[in-house]
Amino acid sequence: MARVFSGIQPTGTLHLGNYLGAIRNWGRLQNDYPCLFCIVDMHAITVPQDPSVLRQNTREVAAGLMAAGVDVRNHVLFNQSAVPGHAQLAWIFNCVARLGWLSRMTQFKEKAGKNRENASVGLYAYPNLMAADILLYKATHVPVGEDQKQHLELARDIAQKFNNDYGVAFFPLPEPVIMTIAPRVMSLRDGTKKMSKSDPSDYARLNLTDDADTMALKIRKAKTDPAPLPDSSEDLKARPEADNLLGIYAALADLSREEALARHAGRQFSAFKEDLTELLVSVLAPINAALRRFLADPGYIDSVLRTGAEQASALARPILTEVSDIVGFLRP
Ligand code: AMP
Ligand code: TRP
């Protein structure tokens, strides 16, 4: 049976990159598959977090997901720590995955930086927990960005090795769902850097919490170059900021880059930015309004997450019981 699982860390406000690169695609998958969407607070604490900020971010991401189209009537939205099965299966996977596999993970190398000895063990074992997230529900399809493909490969390796080691055909091998038109959204200040919640300048990103005036201001201030828009996307390759704004326009309008260029070739950026702002506001203003409505009612957000955790637990329970039996744990 096909099932979608995806996760997002509650480590800051959601921005346009999260929306175009991940969340919007989740919304679209809901028509075709039963989905579980998980706010991965246990992944978040692999690096230090302020507890009250973590709690607030968890609610904010839940609100953002609902505002951006996650349908909690028909699908499951929950936070990871509320379903203890994630930690239980992750421990088993700690014993399946090999040290050598984890030491090849590029995200660990990036996040640990030079001072690797001082990184948490959790940061190293992060992909095992991610594999547990997915396989606890025997999910078959996992929408992820480019940057998470290596972790998903590892989840497949873990599923395969578990099946081999225990001589069972138990876990499916989960497939990545890479959305073809999902762009990598870059910083508005530097077209070679990813738009990121950790960027110190708020002008580098468009947050789902930004109102229309703020969005307009950020686009107006976004870095560009003096040349007009060219008529082929080849000619944008050497102009990262221009390329990024065009890419954002194309993604928002659901066009290819070439189609978007066909509309705007030869125009100056000042004029293009006005169109881009209008499009951006038309897409994000309703999301922003819904987000604010949800945030005004934290009790409702918590009730949604509570229900989601109950639904997720019910799906996980029989799978975890079978895993316990396969592994040889006594269930007294
Ligand atoms: P993060 O904000 O890094 O925790 O990522 C959450 C999700 O959003 C992941 O699926 C990322 O691939 C996606 N994402 C984050 N930043 C961007 C970006 N600048 N462009 C496209 N997708 C992004
Ligand atoms: N590691 C993912 C990220 O940083 C988040 C994540 C955790 C995830 N568990 C997952 C994504 C399971 C897909 C499936 O973006």
Image (cartoon, rainbow, N blue to C red):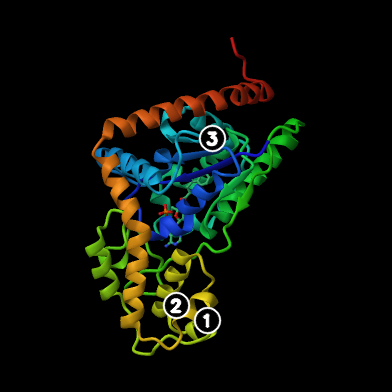
**Residue 100 can be seen in this image:** no
- Dots 1 and 2: beta carbons under 8 Å? yes
The tag earlier along the polypeptide, 1 or 3, is: 3
Nearer to us of marks 1 and 3 is: 1
Disc 2 residue type (three-letter):
Asp
Residue at position x 60%, y 36% in the image: 135
Q: Which mark is residue 76?
A: none
Q: Is residue 308 above or below residue 179?
A: above
Task: Tell me the CA gap for discs 1 and 2.
Answer: 8 Å
Task: Tell me the CA gap for discs 2 and 3.
Answer: 41 Å
Nearer to us of marks 2 and 3 is: 2
Location of the C terminus (image quadrant): top right
Disc 3 residue type (three-letter):
Ala
| Residue 93: percent from left, percent from top | 59, 36
- According to the image, label 2 marks what residue? 243
Position of 255 compared to 195: left or right?
right
Q: Is residue 272 above or below residue 11?
A: below
Position of 130 compared to 290: left or right?
right
| Residue 189 falls in image quadrant | bottom left
Residue at position x 36%, y 69% in the image: 187
The tag earlier along the polypeptide, 1 or 2, is: 1
| Residue 23: percent from left, percent from top | 45, 51
Q: Quadrant of ligand 1?
A: bottom left
Which residue is situated farthest in the right direction here? Answer: 167
Disc 1 residue type (three-letter):
Ser
- Dots 2 and 3: beta carbons under 8 Å? no
- According to the image, label 3 marks what residue? 90
Task: Tell me the CA gap for discs 1 and 3.
Answer: 44 Å
- According to the image, label 1 marks what residue? 233
Label 3, secondary structure: give it.
helix
Which residue is situated farthest in the top direction here? Answer: 332
Residue at position x 34%, y 48% in the image: 11
